[in-house]
Amino acid sequence: MIAFSCLGLANSSSNVKWRKQNKKSNCDVYQGSWLYDESYPIYDSSACPFIRKEFDCIKYGRSDQLYLHYRWQPTACDLPRFDGQKFLESFQGKKIMFIGDSLSLNQFESLLCLLHAADYEVSIMLFHSLLLVDIEQEDMGRVLKLDSLKDGNIWKDMDVLVFNTWHWWYRRGPKQPWDFVQVGDTILKDMDRMVAFHKALTTWAKWVDSDVDTRVFYEELAQGIALKHEEKTTHLHFYFHDIVGGKNSTVVRIAGPPNSSIGNFGNTMMMDDPLTEGPQITSKMIGKAQGLYAMAAQNDLSLLMVVNYVFTEGIYKEAALAFLGGTTSLMI
């Protein structure tokens, strides 16, 4: 899953099949649910030469494979099954570039696995960019320039651009990819990471507006949830498999009052619980985390959730995870 992702298409036609021919209503492909489908996954990862060994979960013994059989189903329209040949025919002679961190690399490799059996002179490239904006080596060290995006001169020659960023914004210590932050003429040792993230995305958005001629543009980063006045979110409980907890079946529970105006977990307590629907006597505190969340719907307790967070305290300090799923434990 990705914290921020968008797709810019030039001169492309929609692949959405509308269920209702109602000109007054549009289908929001981001409103829907995950459905189990035995015909998925579309490709066999063991037969794909592009997947790096550290991400080849099935080959190296991942036992739970149920997640491979889910597909996204919009509420008001149908998305056709991916057809590699049709995709290549549609983009024949075009150049597609993924821009971002390791999540972009995962998307890049997955698309290659979907397409590697056919050849229509479609170029698919990966541009490694942790933060989208520039990091320049200067005498003082590595400077993160929130107002600069020189790499855009390379990107704008592409026909399709897929962007991703978030995972590295909260890194500290040796894993932090910069030494100083520059905003305009001001150089700082550090600053509020959410403010820096917002300034960088503003720079990126201005570049898109001025340099990218897009006919269709999809943005997948939902803004903070605008809850109705009478709704009071007291806690958000989200259970998911703890992928770093060893052999025992555990989940991590996020519990805290999210700020509904910005979709931000300010400083959230993280609990390690048994794999049940609620905290048990064996629950233990494992640290604190900060991050972002987004919801695909507000009127259904079976919500699609996108959550990205970085541990700030505890045994998982500086670890970052992003996940997508549904929860019926939203307490309002």
Image: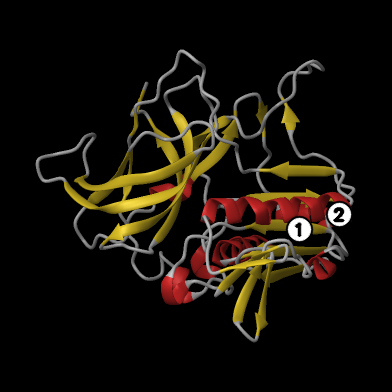
Q: Amino acid at mark 1?
A: Leu
**Residue under label 1:** 161
Q: Residue shown at 52%/17% (left/top)?
A: 228
Tell me whether circle 2 and circle 1 mark residues in contact (CB < 8 Å).
yes
Figure check: 276 above or below 64: above
The reply to whether residue 307 is in sight is yes
Q: Amino acid at mark 2?
A: Val
Task: Name which of mark 2 and mark 1 comes first in the sequence.
Answer: 1
Distance from label 2 to label 1 (Cα)?
9 Å
Q: Residue shown at 31%/51% (left/top)?
A: 288
The reply to whether residue 112 is in sight is no
Find numbered disc 1 in the image and state the secondary structure of the residue it sits on: strand
Figure check: 69 above or below 103: above
Q: Residue shown at 51%/64% (left/top)?
A: 45
Q: Quadrant of residue 16?
A: top right
**Residue under label 2:** 212
Q: Position of residue 15 (x, y in %)?
A: 76, 40
Residue farthest toward the bottom in the current orientation of the protein: 139
Q: Position of residue 70 (x, y in %)?
A: 49, 43
In this rendered view, identify the residue nearer to me: 325 or 322.
322
Residue farthest toward the top in the current orientation of the protein: 230
Disc 2 residue crowd, few under 14, some 14–19, many 20+, Cα 10 Å: many
Q: Nearer the viewer, mark 2 or mark 1?
A: 2
Looking at the rendered image, the quarter that the C terminus falls into is: top left
Figure check: 241 above or below 49: above
Q: Is residue 51 left or right of residue 326?
A: right
